[in-house]
Amino acid sequence: MEETSPKAVVVVPTYNERENLPVLVGLLEELQLANLHILVVDDNSPDGTGEVADKLAANAPDRIGVLHRTEKDGLGRAYIAGMTRALDEGADIVIQMDADLSHPASVLPVMIETLTGTDAAVVLGSRYVPGGSTAAEWPWHRKALSAWANFYVNTLLRLHVKDATAGFKAWKAETLRSIDLPSINSNGYSFQVEMNYRTVKRGLTIREVPIRFEERVKGASKMSLGVQIESALAPWKLLFGGGRK
């Protein structure tokens, strides 16, 4: 009997990404990976991203789905909603990927191969392992802030990964179930840290593969002062009772 490929679902949260989303979907489809699906989670984007997603899904209903949420409720909530639906629909692998084209789709086959061929519970697309890099357009202070954030998080939480704040990840479905996805407390970018922390606390293995992180070309960044403050406080909350057992 011919062995079927594991079902992999790429969860893509969107808010005002109508120009970038079709490009990302095209890049993913060009990979021609067997049993690869895309789930767009749109937070009622004012620019009509949800309608763009619906048109893409109508053209490929067997590969593309759309989850419409009624309001902008943060990156973490969007990912949890999308991941939960992916698991409910039988995903074996769930991939987190930003819609702004900062994550290189070309690395996805390597991430999936690493996830399925090693002891990895999750694979990170990492900027800080050999071969990885940040966007050349980043000014020095943004590079310094990113490097400091990783040092800060690793010092407090002892995650032992190079890119603790990475947002491009491939998860085994059983990993997401074991870390109790619905009870994740963090939102925004600190969501990434809490997911890693729960994985490490359960004795599971995180592996990293190098990526070149690109700066978005179109649209506006979702990073705000509030998000930065939440991200700075998140490790302390996890240390003092925020990491669910």
Image (cartoon, helix red, strand yellow):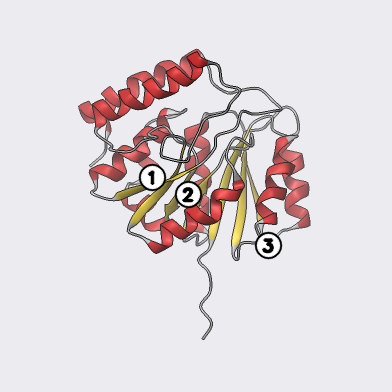
Q: What is the spatial separation of the Cα atoms under label 2 and label 3, in whole angstroms?
A: 19 Å
Q: Which residue is mark 2?
A: 84
**Labelled pair 1, 2 in contact (Cβ < 8 Å):** yes
Q: Is residue 242 above or below residue 94?
A: above
Residue 245 % position (x, y): 22, 42
Q: Which residue is mark 1?
A: 181
Q: Which residue is mark 3?
A: 62
Badge 1 local density, few (<14 within 10 Å), some, or many (20+)?
A: some
- Residue in front for this viewpoint, 163 or 244: 163
User: Which is more N-terminal, label 3 or label 1?
Assistant: 3
**Looking at the image, can residue 87 be seen?**
no
User: Which is more N-terminal, label 3 or label 2?
Assistant: 3
**Looking at the image, can residue 82 be seen?**
yes
Residue 154 % position (x, y): 29, 30
Horizontal side of residue 93 vs 51, given as left or right: left
Badge 2 local density, few (<14 within 10 Å), some, or many (20+)?
A: some
Q: Which kind of residue does numbered mark 3 sit on?
A: Asp
Q: Which kind of residue does numbered mark 2 sit on?
A: Thr
Q: What is the spatial separation of the Cα atoms under label 1 and label 3, in whole angstroms?
A: 26 Å
**Labelled pair 2, 3 in contact (Cβ < 8 Å):** no
